[in-house]
Amino acid sequence: MAIKRSLSLFLLLGLCLSAHATTWFIRHDGGTKAQCTGTTNAPYPGSGTGRPCAYNHPYQLLDWNGHWAKFAGSDTMQFADPATNTKPYYMGEQNGGVGTDWYPQLGGACSHPNTGHAAGAACILPPPPSGTAQNPTKIMGQNAGKCHTPQHTGLVNPTILSGIAGAFTVIDVQGTNFVQLSCIEITQPDNCTNAGVGSGGGCGDMANFISVAGLVLEYGTAQGPSNFTMQDIAVDGTAGFGIIGSHINKTSSDVFTASDIYLIGNGGAGWNGDGGGCNTSCETVGTMNLSYVDIEGSGCLLLKPFDVSQGLAANKFSYCFGQNTGGYGDGFAQVAAGNMTLNVTHSTFKYNTQDGFDSLHLSDDNKTSPVINISSSWAEGNGGQTFKLGAGTSATAINNVSISNCHVLNHAAAFPHNPPGWIVLDGGDTCRASGDEWAFQLNNGTVVTLENNTSVGYGTTMYDLGCAPLQPKCLSNGVKFIFRNNISKGYPDPGNSGRIASGFYFGSGGCPGAAGTCIFANAGSAIDHNLWNTMKSGCPDSSVGLEKVYTCGDPKLAGGSNIDAINPNLASGSPAIGAGVSIGAITTDYNGVARPQRPSIGAFEPEPAK
């Protein structure tokens, strides 16, 4: 009886929350909180107070102290401008004549206008109130539900929120639970960045910019969001990070979901998932599902106007900064993981001034067992490594494209998005870690699986395996490495006298003999049906010596002569076609083409005849 009463009370509470949830409408032709109720999707008629009409800005939902006055848990904030609207909502206190003087309405949260950086740093929205699993709190742009292109190249008519006056951030979701964000572009008015020294492009005292990140998941050691969902979000051309924060989720059943996320040309890292100074006290748990995440040009200054529907394709950069010039330009970085699972698919990491995809330090805490799965994703043209995977339990990489051409950012002629006068990345910042392409950090018992990937490029090593510092003997303590159906093709390194990359590099790892032989001799390990071409370590890889079934020779890529313009699809007559081994879990290729019983080696099957 007590259980039935509790269930009835829970259902009643859910119904009450649903019944009392309010939709607040925001549109440029709305009115103030005195003029309008905010609950009717209509313009302000021009006179009167308390009229049934929309608000003209999200700040109308705040009180004098900058707290939520009306927006409550399970409510919806709906931007309701026409789908073709491109007029931004300026987020922050008026500066240089841009934006609104919020001081008369919001008091202490916003200082007097036109006073430089301090004017907008705190004049921001607080974190949204938490919703419930049945009734999440929502912030929805004007075109929500129809907000990305069919090809997942970018957004279609999102609501634009433009940070001004050094605003700390535009959207902050720290500590929230069951919040959804959709169809929003976050940017800033000025072409300036916080990164870089001595090359210009910096934000002056009266500049209108975002100082930390467009979207803050967590800052310092705070709790990040739990059960957060974001779809169709762009952060582009900001002075700081695109997204910052980890410490995501509170329980093992919590799920973080991000899809169609475009982080283009932000001054810092595109997605900086660094917990920051908390050791193991603020680790991410639960599950993170990321799909169609496009992170490009991190550490570079994106030039406006920016076409958010095209990703990098129709846009240009100016300055690019790496660590030697005060920058931090990783594409995606996630650290401080507890018992979490990170799933990444159909994502892109290009032209970032440091690493493309970096989850190497997920497994730094050897008391936890994170899992990472990445598939059908593409890394190219990054100043550092392409994919870096660290795992406690397992790491799986399937159908990915890895192109290591790390010098492209300091060769203006080769970089396809440089405008006249483009200032290249400092030469000392390209090809970090000797240009190693893939990197793995392993714990005792870790299982690493690489199947049907296409990897091409130059550097010292294509596959770099090492043990986590707290488990230095991992190679002789149950590590399994499964390496099948992969294409590995080396190119001359223009920054290292034309050196060709070796295949594998293994740390000592406690093996009694050669590390390569040791790891692939472990029970459960496998290496077979791979294609090797122009690798310093030969075909098959001489550091292993255990591969019995393999293919040597040019894979005949559709476009393989220019490392800075690779087309990794297979041309007719490629020896990779039909030369792989069938893997039950891999039913399609990178493009979604069905894998036959005798699959091809690499990420691609030949395109079906039309």
Image (spheres, helix red, strand yellow):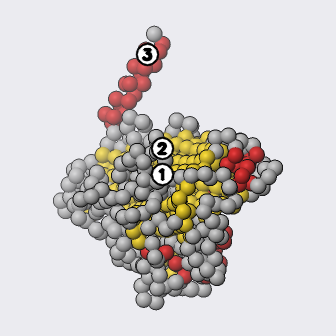
Q: Residue furthest bottom?
A: 421
Give above or below for 66 relative to 119: above
Q: Find the distance from the CA under tag 3 to the CA under tag 2.
A: 51 Å
Q: Nearer the viewer, mark 3 or mark 2?
A: 2
**Along the line of sight, which residue is nearer the eye, 382 or 280?**
382
Q: Which label sits on residue 5?
A: 3
Residue at 76% across / 46% down in the picture? 476
Q: Are marks 3 and 1 in contact (CB under 8 Å)?
A: no
Q: Residues within 10 Å of mark 2 (few under 14, many from 20)?
A: some
The amino acid type, in three-letter code, at marker 2 is Ile
Q: Is residue 220 visible?
A: no
* Mark sitting earlier along the chain (3/2): 3
Residue at 20% over, 58% down: 43
Q: Which residue is mark 2?
A: 583
Instruction: Decide which of 283, 456 is in the foreground and name it.
Output: 456
What residue appears at the point 43 percent right and 50 percent down from the top-left corner? 599
The amino acid on which the numbered mark 3 sits, given as a three-letter code, is Arg
Assign a secondary structure to mark 2: loop
Image coords of residue 102 (percent x, y): 41, 65
Query: For the N terminus, which image quadrant?
Result: top left
Mark 3 and mark 2 residues within 8 Å of each other at the beta carbon: no
Query: Local crowd at mark 1 within 10 Å, few (<14), some, or many (≥20)?
Result: many
Q: Position of residue 24 (x, y in %)?
A: 31, 49
Residue for badge 1: 580
Q: CA distance from mark 3 to mark 1?
A: 59 Å
